[in-house]
Amino acid sequence: MKVIKDGTVTTAKGFLAAAATCGIKQSGKPDISLVASATDCTAAGVFTLNQVAAAPVLLDKATLAENQTAVRAVLTNSGNANASTGEPGMVNARQMQAWTAEALGCQANQVLIMSTGVIGQQLPMAKVAVGVKTAVSALSPDSGMAATQAIMTTDLVAKHLAVEVELAGGIVTIGGMAKGSGMIHPNMATMLGVVTTDAAVEAGLLQQMLRVANNHSFNRITVDGDTSTNDTVILLANGASGVAIDANNAAAFQAALTHVCTELAKMIVRDGEGASKFVEIQVTGAPSETAAHAVAQTIATSPLVKTAFAGSDPNWGRILAAAGRAGVTFDQYQTGLWIGVEDANGLQLVKDGTPTGYAEADAAAIFAAPSFVIRLDLGCGDAATTMWTTDLTHGYITINADYRT
Amino acid sequence: MKVIKDGTVTTAKGFLAAAATCGIKQSGKPDISLVASATDCTAAGVFTLNQVAAAPVLLDKATLAENQTAVRAVLTNSGNANASTGEPGMVNARQMQAWTAEALGCQANQVLIMSTGVIGQQLPMAKVAVGVKTAVSALSPDSGMAATQAIMTTDLVAKHLAVEVELAGGIVTIGGMAKGSGMIHPNMATMLGVVTTDAAVEAGLLQQMLRVANNHSFNRITVDGDTSTNDTVILLANGASGVAIDANNAAAFQAALTHVCTELAKMIVRDGEGASKFVEIQVTGAPSETAAHAVAQTIATSPLVKTAFAGSDPNWGRILAAAGRAGVTFDQYQTGLWIGVEDANGLQLVKDGTPTGYAEADAAAIFAAPSFVIRLDLGCGDAATTMWTTDLTHGYITINADYRT
């Protein structure tokens, strides 16, 4: 597997992209993003489980149920989430899809759409109409980066990546873009992703592979069933490489796909709203993977833990306290806790639920690093998980108290 | 029911209190608090469900299992939680209990203890020994306020209250004190409470009544099973009023007890770390009370919702988005949302999941108030609940990023 410098969603053969600025964002920044394939793609999607799923999420699910084998494009608007917008919001989503299809010269059910931004406001459709036309007319293999920038909201950094992987059968490319701000839950601030590949992958297999990749990447910074109104990841495969994925090369392709998704997920965390630290949370010795995930998730989202990270304060009691309220039964006198900068083998803080005789300065030095790893062993099983999170800072408050104003 | 001005844990007949400063807190503020009865009390307790329960919690549970009918005192230290301290922590908790009993001239199992403060450090027992002796020798009916102040940690305000209630049989008094900082979860920052009454209440009934009161008060600012390592509420009844609680007056006594606990719980929220707003969250139209509670809890703890409160920004989409990830199934197109300053009848923002034509300025005016009410109707049942929460501000970050330093 080889990382392609400056790789994007258009690095894989046969993909085009475009961006447009139509005034949905008050800031005047680009707010329409389009990724398209010159030929039909098989398509897969994973979506938010939120009960208040946005109109584009409901529409994409319906579209993929009709057509997973001849998808041509993903159109995204930023600045307005088209969520909590009722039936008018559904009408607008269908209109956006239809306009894009019309401009591309394909059927409506060959277009998927995504939205991100403020919830509860109707889309300014006259502006969207202009944006869609502008974007379609600007499609180019060189605009992957522009398309990436046009899906950003509170993101500070454009998140994109492409890899080339040599498979039995030939070389394929996988590229992707994502947006999201990983502070508390990327699931609350919307997470969107589009991944493209020139491999030829049968639709059922594609969906399965996206699900596996998602469980090891975007779901490690969020949690099943605990997502925003708009979270969506779309995977398009157009077969332009001439290489088909089959039993001989599926594992290698899966590994590359998972890598692309994991790197994009980590980029989201690193760009977390107001974040100054990147922290890997490992939970080991859990009775089940679900239990490990519940404990890791509770630690990774605890405001007290995250403010301790922000203060570079190795106040590890908060980590154990968070674990203890995760709804998982364990014996506190069997727990162990380690921290380190590179991996979790740096310093053991807790053994059998009791503080070790570690030096406070050593622990403080690790927590002062911009990136560190924590491992909590529950001592009651063999299951484990890893999640990625950030600290909770003044910057987060500033961004989110003033987001709409 | 009559509220007693400046009422405390010593307002009920036969109760004494004391405070001492023994150096557990670096700040030099009082850190030992004692509440005692001149005569034996029946006692009840509700405790954290956290798997990493602190040593004093484990000890009090064992003590109450042995003795619920002849309890004499509750000794609390602040500045150190004696949590995540392993077997040495249990030894220290037992020692603290034994020293208090010795100084009071009673048995160890007649004393309950509580601790609050930093997790994961052993208690400085030489200091505690001095503090216990000092407190016991200072017991006085006038020191209820001093005892209240001595349990504070990040609290800005001392939380205390007493009411007098005329029952069939005579007048009884109920007084209480509490500490806790209600920002994110009072469950994470420890919540402690001691409630005293001069009514005579049989131990089994006392426990049942405390459980009911707790479910309508402290559990409305926290959530079952989701509590800190140390959360404890103790209720002592010494019978000094000569009035026994029985079938004729139990309902009135329960109402007064619930009132005292609810007022203390609201004081904790109002004093939330960094809080500038007090918000009541009502969830109605839920399929069950558990579902209503889950939705209310998710809204009440959502960092995005709470930063919107801080910014006085009626960004109600975040409220619906939080509800949608609470694990409760509902139809977003049946939901309604109301906000108001005094009650939830002020302004309807959402009808059938769709924004109403409300004026933004009207919504902003309500969110700008220091205290307001939100009602989300899920439109799928008859169950309802109420919770109380605060906003999430820069002040919270400052307090918690620097708590130990």
Image: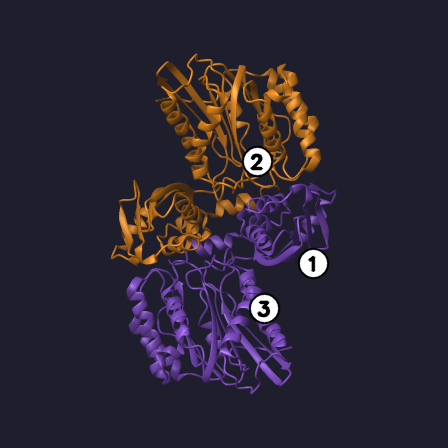
Chain colours: A purple, B orange
Residue B389 visible within the image: yes
Task: Say whether disc 1 or disc 3 marks the residue closer to the N-terminus.
Answer: 3
Task: Classify the position of the C terminus of chain A by image quarter.
Answer: bottom left
Crowd class of label 1 (few under 14; some 14 to 19; many from 20; radius 10 Å): some
Distance from the alpha carbon under mark 1 to that under mark 3:
18 Å
Under mark 1, the amino acid is: Asp
Labels 1 and 2 in the same subunit: no
- Residue at 59 percent across and 36 percent down: it is B117
Labels 2 and 3 in the same subunit: no
In this view, B150 is above or below B301: above
Q: Can you tell which mark lies on residue B132?
A: none
Badge 2 element: loop
Q: For marks 1 and 2, give the one nearer the viewer.
A: 2
Distance from the alpha carbon under mark 2 to that under mark 3:
39 Å
Direction from residue B97 to residue B248 in the image, left or right: left
- Residue at 60 percent across and 18 percent down: it is B136
In this view, A196 is above or below B181: below
Identify the residue under disc 3: A263
Crowd class of label 3 (few under 14; some 14 to 19; many from 20; radius 10 Å): some
Labels 1 and 3 in the same subunit: yes
Badge 3 element: helix
Under mark 3, the amino acid is: Glu
Residue A95, image x, y percentages: 31, 74
Badge 1 element: loop
Identify the residue under disc 2: B230
Which chain does tag 1 point to? A
Identify the residue under disc 1: A343
